[in-house]
Amino acid sequence: MGNRVAAMSVPPTEKRRQVVKSPSKDGPETKARADGAGTETGRSSGPSVRITNQFRKGPAMVYDLSCEDVRLTLEMTGATSVEHAAEWRVEAFARHDPQRPKINGSGATRRDALQSVALAWEAQRGVQGFPAVNWEGVADALSAVRAI
């Protein structure tokens, strides 16, 4: 039957190595990384964020998110008047606090409005019931469902 090459299987517990080449002034340099480092599958950018519920509330779209121990609600609304036709608004609050302090932001796009809220939230963090939130994870979760 000719020459056959047997496929080798790698046990799942054994780490694979990825070789990454990057040029330097002295020539190509080779670095080895542990499995997943710098790849899409092994990317770890902080705590996990996921959307637990989404629904319409009048003209707004509401997203409930779980960010580790924080339950965050975002309400996104498009322009409500002709003079603000290119403006999006986002209102955010954490549901863990009975007073539910709110942060509002606006921008030309939904992503800009979310970024405005994230900046305002971070400025208030630790004050008046604003817990730490992984805003990059929030943006990733919203992007996954095409919300921003």
Image: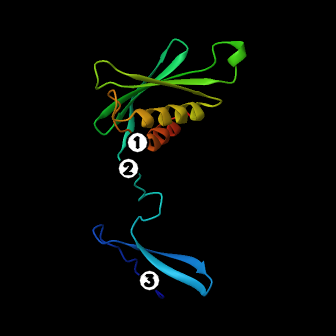
Q: Is residue 2 visible?
A: yes
Q: Position of residue 97 (x, y in %)?
A: 29, 23
Upstream in the sequence, badge 2 or badge 1? 2
Q: Name the residue type under label 2.
A: Gly
Element class at badge 3: loop
Distance between the Cα atoms at labels 3 and 2? 42 Å
Upstream in the sequence, badge 3 or badge 2? 3
Q: Position of residue 92 (x, y in %)?
A: 44, 26
Q: Which residue is mark 2?
A: 46
Residue at 57% in and 30% down: 113
Upstream in the sequence, badge 3 or badge 1? 3
| On screen, residue 22 above or below 123 | below
Distance between the Cα atoms at labels 2 and 1? 7 Å
Residue contact between numbered discs 2 and 1, judged by CB atoms under 8 Å:
yes
| On screen, residue 116 above or below 10 | above
Q: Nearer the viewer, mark 3 or mark 1?
A: 1
| On screen, residue 143 above or below 42 | above
Left or right, 129 with respect to 37, comes to left
Q: Name the residue type under label 3.
A: Val
Element class at badge 1: loop
Q: Position of residue 39 (x, y in %)?
A: 47, 62
Residue at 49% in and 36% down: 119
Q: Which mark is residue 5?
A: 3
The residue lying furthest to the right in this view is: 83
